[in-house]
Image: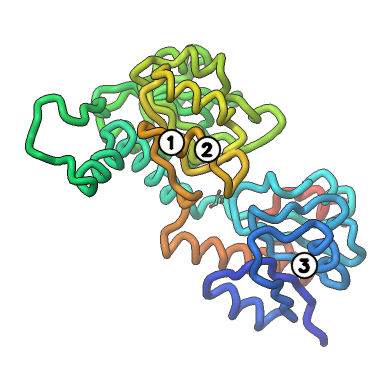
Amino acid sequence: MSKPAVVVTHPVLEPAPALLEDACEVRQLPNVYKHPVEKLRQAAEGVQGMLTQLMDEINEEVLSAPGLKCVSNVAVGFDNIDVAAATKHGVLVTNTPGILDDTTADFAFTLLAAAARRLVEADKFIRGGDFKGWAIDMLLGHDIHGATLGLVGFGRIGRGVARRGRAFGMRVLYYDEFPAQPDVERELGVTRTELDQLLEDSDFVSLHVPLTATTRHLIGAPQLARMKKTAVLVNTSRGPVVDEEALAEALAEGQIFAAGLDVFEREPAVHPKLLKLDNVVLAPHIASASVRTRSQMCEVAARNLIAGVSGGRPANLVNPEVLDKRG
Ligand code: DGY
């Protein structure tokens, strides 16, 4: 029996290539950062599955390729895929939830601490030859312990950051349109508030929402204006959740103290005003980038794809209704 054909849009880590080679006829696309949509559409012709990454815009044009059964994204986020169009065309969409939560939460907390305690500025200071001796007012930052942490979005990653905050002796607030169960709130020692209240009360605001039409620019000028002058904003979710221009203004004007950003509105471009500011720590979308987690993400995505093109039920289906309809 011939193996199902699949397209792999970008290189992936072991064991994914070995798993895929074993079960499928693999077509690897050339290693370019962003494939034009027409190339993705061409690539989708004559294959049953696609292993995609967050740079790939998988729109209806791609999803309507005849015979396409499954698009497996090597990420927990899937805002790069038009899921409604996939469902309409009977294409399964899968992601990689549950693997990267703690790795991402570790990194959100790393950004929080680095921004609060001015670690990157301090490093530059020394390398620039400016350290001439200890000084009482040198590079003063803000305390993490005893501060209030506000989590916007309280899914698995938000909860992981809550645990880290509690371990640092922080008071933890969260905002999520779906309140957590009372026993979860009790166990984690967190309190739900409305977004505006959270912004006003928090010393640290960390974002953990998916990118949707509702969360695009959830944090813009009006929200930044509510935050404390001493507050730090951390974003490890998706860049467009924050209005980058408004954030750059707020940081430049000292409307908030600092920010730690792992994601950007127009990746890989970073707003030029942010690049000039010392009070922002910038990272190139690496919150999930530990050796173990990235390899597991690739493995899970490969297994999802193999199941999706072989008539099985992938473990991480974003649109299970496609299979339910198939019966
Ligand atoms: C995701 O998985 O959505 C991250 O942004 C990349 O790990």
Q: 17 or 162: which is nearer to us? A: 17
Q: 199 or 70: which is nearer to us? A: 199
At label 1, counting other C-alpha atoms closer than 10 Å, the crowd grade (few under 14, some 14-19, many 20 or more) is few
Q: Which mark is residue 272?
A: 2
Is tag 2's residue or tag 3's residue first in the polypeptide sequence?
3
Q: Which mark is residue 276?
A: 1
Residue located at (62% from left, 42% from top): 266
Q: Which mark is residue 144?
A: none
Q: How is the image coloured?
A: rainbow
At label 3, counting other C-alpha atoms closer than 10 Å, the crowd grade (few under 14, some 14-19, many 20 or more) is many
Q: Is residue 160 left or right of residue 320?
A: left
Residue located at (53% from left, 17% from top): 223
Residue holding disc 3: 49
Quadrant of the drawing holding the C terminus = bottom right
Quadrant of the drawing holding the N terminus = bottom right
Badge 2 amino acid: Pro
- Residue 42, compared with residue 113, is above or below; it is below
Q: CA distance from mark 2 to mark 3?
A: 38 Å
* Label 2 C-beta lies within 8 Å of the nearest ligand 1 atom: no
Badge 1 amino acid: Lys
- Rendered location of residue 229, percent (x, y): 37, 16
Q: Is residue 123 left or right of residue 155?
A: left
- Rendered location of residue 47, percent (x, y): 83, 71
Residue located at (61% from left, 59% from top): 74
**Which marked residue is nearer to the observer: mark 1 or mark 3?**
1
Examine the rendering and report whether any part of residue 3 can be seen. Answer: yes
Labelled pair 2, 3 in contact (Cβ < 8 Å): no
